[in-house]
Image (cartoon, grey):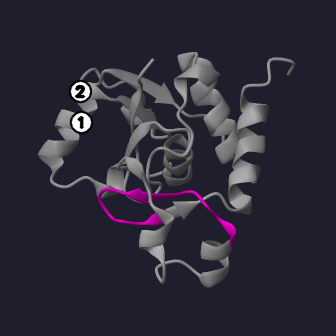
Amino acid sequence: MNYRFLADRTLGKLAKWLRILGFDTIFEPDVRPKSDLNRLLQERVLLTRIVKNAGRSDVKRVVFIDVNDVYGQLQQVVDELAITRQDIRIFSICTTCNSALYEIDKQSLFGLVPDYIWETHHQFHRCRQCERIYWAGSHAERCKKIIEQLFDESK
């Protein structure tokens, strides 16, 4: 399923993790003007920790987040929406601006990434919007372990 989210101002870390999983996730403080927010609420799943938002009728769907830690929040979203491993597209969305990433030729990045990274990595991605450059560093392995735990059916 192709979920699209709007995370309220209390859920910035959750928004980042949903982007890591490959979900189009807008973080409320980035939305201006107010009319855009109202339009987005009609086409996205609202993730909120604010009680008054949980009962909104002008929203496609609401998930009231009642867990404090980000990994528990992520697990709650996955469980409540029945998201499967097949639904995710890990590392396909920019964690900064929520735009799609594309693979970029290593040679074109010479001088744009640290020398050690350029010499030791062969695959790079870049954001279409903010032009941030991504590569699979040690954080990628940590993220993959967390994602494995997220979808571990033996829990």
Q: Mark 1 points at which residue?
A: 40
The amino acid type of the residue labelled 2 equals Gln
Is residue 111 rendered to the left or right of residue 83? left
Q: Are marks 1 and 2 in contact (CB under 8 Å)?
A: yes
**Under tag 1, what secondary structure?**
helix
The residue nearer to you, when weighing 28 against 120, is 120
Q: Which quadrant holds residue 145?
A: top right
Q: Would you call the spot at circle 1 few (<14 residues within 10 Å), some (14-19), or many (20 or more)?
A: many
Give the percent coordinates (x, y) of residue 22.
49, 38
| Inter-mark Cα distance, 1 to 2 | 5 Å
Give the percent coordinates (x, y) of residue 27.
38, 49
The residue nearer to you, when weighing 30 against 101, is 101
Q: Is residue 46 above or below residue 155?
A: below
The residue range painted magenta reads: 120-133
Q: Mark 2 points at which residue?
A: 42
**Under tag 2, what secondary structure?**
helix
Who's the residue at 46% across and 38% down the image?
48
